[in-house]
Amino acid sequence: MAKIASALAFWIFWLVGPAWAELEICNDTAARHKIAIGYKQDGHWVSEGWWQLAPSACIAAVKGDLDFRFYYFRAESPGRLFQHDRLSFCTRDGLFTIAGDNDCARRGYEKSYFAKIDVGRGTTHYSQSLSTHSIQSEGQAEAKIPSSPGTWGLPFKGEAMFHGCSPVFRGTERFCAFVGAGRVFTVTEDSRTPAEIFTILRNMTPGTPVQIEGDWFSLYDNAVSLVLRSVQERAPNTQDQIHKKLQGEWYSVVDPNDEFTVVGSGRQNRYRGALTSMEYLSVMPYCGEFNTKGQYLYAWDSQGGTGLCYAIKEVSEMELVLIYLPRGTELRYYRLN
């Protein structure tokens, strides 16, 4: 029972999370919206989206202390107009994190106008309502709140890696997870996802590259809640092949007491044999504002917190060399025979 309670608490932490300093965006309209934000990170502009925000729901768009006075957001919903401040950022369909706010079309993105959020000076928490900028289009009826939560999801399709399933609620239901593009996608065995999907997942090996398709319901920090319509194995891409090479135990060249083990999309860190943090890993062609040619490793703590970016300089059967960004610190690891 203690193990079940621990597993349940872990997964609930993913979906709910603790209260802390943040920029919160709340949907006080009767229409579902998708949300994108713009902000500064390490001196560079970054845009990120899309969050799916149901009526009466809120999302924490920026976690931690608000280091700047101004942030920016865009909200879109059929039949509604967004009153922006002609401040442009780059966007695209689906999930995105885009470095820079210039040359959007040349880089294959769309140029979208955002509204300014003035959080004030010295603020640690701020709540922004959608109705201040999202208004009903003239001649359009107000969107109705769906009678069933199962109809709120918006279509989603993407590549990920199967992470595994965890039984909860005395083993009668499961949370299954996929990791991809710096996010954890969670699926609950609660009758919304067809039973045959979970039959497939129970027989799937963690670390399997997959194409997932379904309805995206919510995003909290790095955790996306999905209802799956299909899951299919796919041929490994370049990032999957690098990820496969990362599997196993690694030891620091500088400090042999510092070691970690990669299994699937998880990295268990240890020091002098004692377990420390457990992280999720994504290999991507970009990481935050870093998007020059090459491959990157994004690592983030399984219980929340700031993610870390590394450039992958070399990975072989016996050697791993990472460059910690933005400092440029070289980290070398080796594998035992």
Image (cartoon, rainbow, N blue to C red):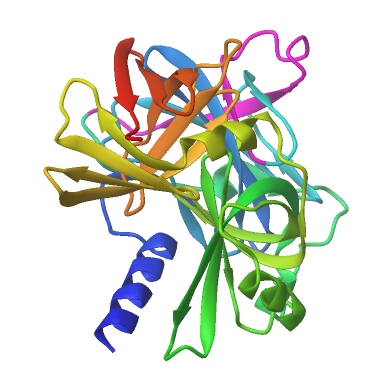
Quadrant holding the N terminus:
bottom left
Query: What residue sits 36% from the left and 52% below the top?
Result: 302
Please say whether residue 204 is visible from this viewpoint: yes
Query: What residue sits 29% from the left and 59% below the top?
Result: 18
Residue 243 percent across, percent down from the top left: 54, 37
Residue 67: name its quadrant: top left
Please say whether residue 68 is visible from this viewpoint: no
In the picture, measured across the screen, residue 189 lies left or right of residue 62, that is right
Residue 316 percent across, percent down from the top left: 49, 24
Q: Is residue 98 found inside the magenta-colored segment of the image? A: yes
- 317 to 150, vertically: above or below: above
Query: What residue sits 71% from the left and 14% below the top?
Result: 104
| Numbered marks: total | 0
Residue 239: name its quadrant: top right
Quadrant holding the C terminus:
top left
- 113 to 292, vertically: above or below: below
- 104 to 299, vertically: above or below: above
Residue 315 percent across, percent down from the top left: 48, 23
In the picture, measured across the screen, residue 152 lies left or right of residue 277, that is right
Query: What residue sits 71% from the left and 72% below the top?
Result: 200
Residue projecting furthest to the right = 139
Q: Is residue 282 found inside the magenta-colored segment of the image? A: no
- 115 to 261, vertically: above or below: above
Foreground residue, 67 or 201? 201
Foreground residue, 96 or 201? 201
Foreground residue, 111 or 143? 111
In the picture, measured across the screen, residue 240 lies left or right of residue 59, that is right
Q: Which residues are magenta?
A: 95-121
